[in-house]
Image (cartoon, coloured by chain):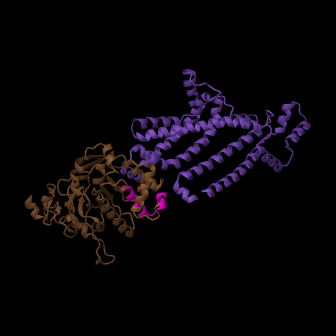
Chain colours: A brown, B purple
């Protein structure tokens, strides 16, 4: 991997305040990301994958307020505590975003060319005409046929795969150093998924970008990520190089996730293997291990304090499970 | 797109024809014999022969179909017959009155358009904060205040107390301001709610999150992303409101002593001047039909999905 990380997250905790409730979808998360590296953030729905990446950059649904603590160093700039204007100047320019559903993420009433071009206008200081040329370039770059025609079309005239390509063009229009892709293939056909993933990897290497891939699809993780961070109930429970985490998981939750993937030898019509139980409610603070209630290896001590996140026997892999990682326990 | 407009225009003409039949039928079936009225107006002791003479003059003794054909032919050429009351050509007075009402409604529409956009925009920019609450409150007040009361208040404030604008009359732009405000106020209040609610809905859409991820400011998101999406709904509401403004003109015109078409219509009804009533009805209906077609075309032009579907 390469030298200095461009993103260094430490002890990131996010409380979301709505009119009636407070929840903590992100609880003390830490990770690093280097240039040209792809980190997959994996976990089931509601595990805090998306909020971890979006809330610190000021991307929140209307009416929700985020209380963020910890530290996020992006290109040696502290993002936690930055004012809205600073965050806004980073969005689109240094950090590009791709969303899950290209059907609704594009504005239905505007031509796709304009939606791409305005990013170039805003962040590269281009004139409308220059931005139009840039949009044309980008449309070619994301592999769309008839680029001149596409530029003038509206989102409803394009298929899901093409719309996601437009979304990618928007995200990379200002050549950001970091690309955050939130389940970029989930809403697409299986055949299109592979194309989009390949395109993302290709653009990443061409532009020397770092990429965060938020997903729950282990196939996507195996195919595209250098490293994986597994999240459960707002906490990171395991990180490491993709192939090692997938082949030798060191946390019971990761094991459960990988075990839940249907296998070729499974009988047709047999029940899917799932994890028993449901994730904890994030409103109340969790003192011990968040996974304890669903864990087959749990011992009494698991409930006493949050398990430390430590290196395991597998090189490069760290996990928050002292029970399965005796060596790590000894180190602690 | 062209085919769509052509189709709409054809339907409008058909509708207009039906409306003319309805207008004529309404007036013909109205109780009372106009000929008697006119004959008695000339000589209080009118005989049967006098009445027959008037009927002969007005063509009232001819078969209905022929009368309709005669009237329609005239109407198409701008000749709406002679007013029973004044003896003047209805077409001529329509023309001068139409200019007055058109000035009133057009001005009122501009007031409603600008005021509603401004108020709605302020409310959306400062959503759920003081400016939003204040504008929302005044919009509710405005939407529930009848225009004759608004007009009276405006006259009291601007003419009687501050002497800024004249109380009534139709002499130049200064005297147009109060009527325009009076007529435009209620529609502005209603439309500002359409803008505000439209913005609120649009700002919760996923494409706004995309726009935020581009680093656009809230103002430019409102202008670039929200406005194109609320335009069709807004134009639809604006069309309806312009329609009600024509009705509102009937109230506002007498308030400022403007000799508009509303005033013509009211006096026509009062004196059973059927030629005038008939002509006014036809003008109103024509206006509504054209308004509908224009609004339809505008909506189709602003909504790319409809445009695709209709062309």
Image coords of residue B115 (percent x, y): 51, 37
Tell me, yes or no, whether the highlighted magenta stretch contains residue A156: yes
Q: Nearer the viewer, residue B138 or B74?
A: B74
Q: Residue furthest right?
A: B49
Residue A123, relative to residue A232: is it above or below? Answer: above
Q: Which residues are magenta?
A: A148-171
Q: Nearer the viewer, residue A129 or A204?
A: A129
Query: Residue drawn 45% across and 65% down?
Result: A145
Residue A52, relative to residue A19: is it above or below? Answer: below
Residue A20 lies left or right of residue B156; in this view the side is: left
Q: Is residue B204 visible?
A: no
Image coords of residue A205 (percent x, y): 30, 62
Tell me, yes or no, whether the highlighted magenta stretch contains residue A303: no
Q: Is residue B179 visible?
A: yes
Residue B105 lies left or right of residue B80; in this view the side is: left
Query: Residue drawn 14% across and 57% down?
Result: A308
Query: Residue drawn 58% across and 30% down?
Result: B177
Q: Quadrant of the N terminus of chain A?
A: bottom left
Q: Nearer the viewer, residue A265 or A195?
A: A195
Image coords of residue A78 (percent x, y): 24, 47
Q: Quadrant of the C terminus of chain A?
A: bottom left
Q: Quadrant of residue A198?
A: bottom left
Q: Magenta region, mostly helix, strand or loop?
A: helix
Image coords of residue B305 (percent x, y): 52, 57
């Amino acid at each position: 991997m390469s030298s200095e990380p461009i993103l260094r997250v430490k002890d990131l905790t996010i409380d979301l305040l709505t009119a009636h409730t407070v929840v903590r979808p992100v609880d003390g998360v830490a990770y690093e990301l280097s240039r040209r590296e792809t980190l997959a953030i994996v976990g089931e729905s509601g595990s805090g994958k998306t909020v971890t990446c979006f809330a610190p950059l000021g991307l929140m649904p209307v009416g929700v307020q985020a209380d963020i603590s910890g530290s996020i160093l992006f290109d040696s700039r502290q993002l936690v505590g930055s004012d809205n204007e600073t965050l806004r100047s980073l969005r689109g320019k240094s950090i590009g975003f791709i969303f899950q559903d290209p059907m609704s993420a594009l504005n239905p009433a505007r031509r796709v060319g304009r939606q791409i071009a305005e990013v170039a206008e805003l962040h590269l200081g281009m004139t409308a005409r220059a931005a139009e040329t840039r949009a044309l370039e980008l449309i070619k770059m994301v592999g769309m046929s008839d680029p001149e025609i596409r530029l003038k079309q509206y989102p409803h005239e394009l298929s899901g795969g093409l719309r996601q390509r437009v979304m990618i063009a928007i995200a990379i229009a200002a050549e950001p150093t970091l690309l955050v892709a939130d389940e970029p293939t989930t809403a697409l056909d299986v055949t299109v998924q592979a194309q989009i993933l390949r395109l993302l990897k290709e653009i990443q290497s061409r532009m020397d970008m770092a990429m965060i891939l938020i997903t729950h699809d282990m196939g996507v993780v195996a195919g595209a990520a250098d490293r994986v961070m597994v999240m459960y109930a707002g906490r990171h429970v395991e990180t490491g190089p993709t192939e090692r985490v997938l082949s030798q998981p060191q946390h019971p939750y990761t094991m459960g996730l990988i075990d839940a993937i249907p296998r070729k030898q499974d009988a047709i019509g047999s029940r899917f293997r799932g994890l028993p139980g449901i994730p904890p409610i994030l409103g109340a603070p969790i003192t011990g291990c968040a996974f304890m209630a669903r864990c087959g290896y749990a011992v009494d001590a698991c409930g006493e304090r949050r398990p430390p996140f430590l290196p395991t026997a597998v090189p490069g892999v760290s996990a928050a499970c002292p029970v399965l990682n005796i060596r790590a326990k000894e180190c602690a | 797109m062209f085919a769509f407009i052509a189709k709409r225009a054809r339907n409008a003409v058909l509708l207009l024809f039906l409306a003319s039949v309805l207008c004529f039928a309404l007036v013909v079936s109205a109780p009372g014999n106009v000929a008697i009225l006119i004959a008695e107006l000339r000589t209080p002791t009118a005989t049967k022969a006098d009445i027959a003479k008037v009927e002969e003059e007005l063509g009232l003794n001819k078969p209905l179909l022929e009368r309709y054909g005669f009237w329609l032919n005239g109407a198409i050429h701008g000749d709406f017959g002679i007013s029973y009351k004044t003896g003047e050509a209805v077409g001529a007075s329509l023309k001068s009155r139409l200019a007055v009402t058109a000035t009133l409604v057009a001005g009122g529409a501009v007031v409603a358009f600008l005021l509603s956009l401004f108020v709605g925009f302020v409310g959306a920019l400062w959503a759920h904060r003081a400016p939003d609450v204040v504008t929302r409150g005044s919009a509710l007040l405005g939407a529930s205040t009848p225009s004759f009361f608004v007009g009276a208040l405006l006259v009291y404030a601007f003419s009687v107390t501050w002497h800024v604008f004249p109380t009534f009359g139709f002499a130049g732009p200064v005297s147009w301001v109060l009527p325009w405000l009076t007529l435009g106020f209620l529609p502005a209040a209603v439309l500002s709610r359409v803008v505000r609610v439209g913005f609120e809905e649009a700002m919760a859409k996923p494409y706004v999150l995309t726009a935020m991820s581009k680093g656009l400011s809230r103002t430019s998101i409102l202008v670039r992303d929200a406005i194109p999406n609320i335009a069709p709904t807004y134009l639809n509401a604006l069309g309806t409101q312009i329609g009600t403004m024509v009705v509102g003109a009937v109230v506002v015109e007498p308030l400022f002593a403007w000799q508009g078409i509303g005033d013509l219509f009211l006096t026509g009804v009062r004196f059973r001047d059927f030629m005038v009533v008939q002509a006014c009805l036809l003008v109103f209906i024509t206006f509504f039909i054209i308004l509908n077609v224009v609004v339809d075309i505008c909506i189709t032009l602003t909504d790319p999905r409809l445009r695709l579907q209709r062309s």
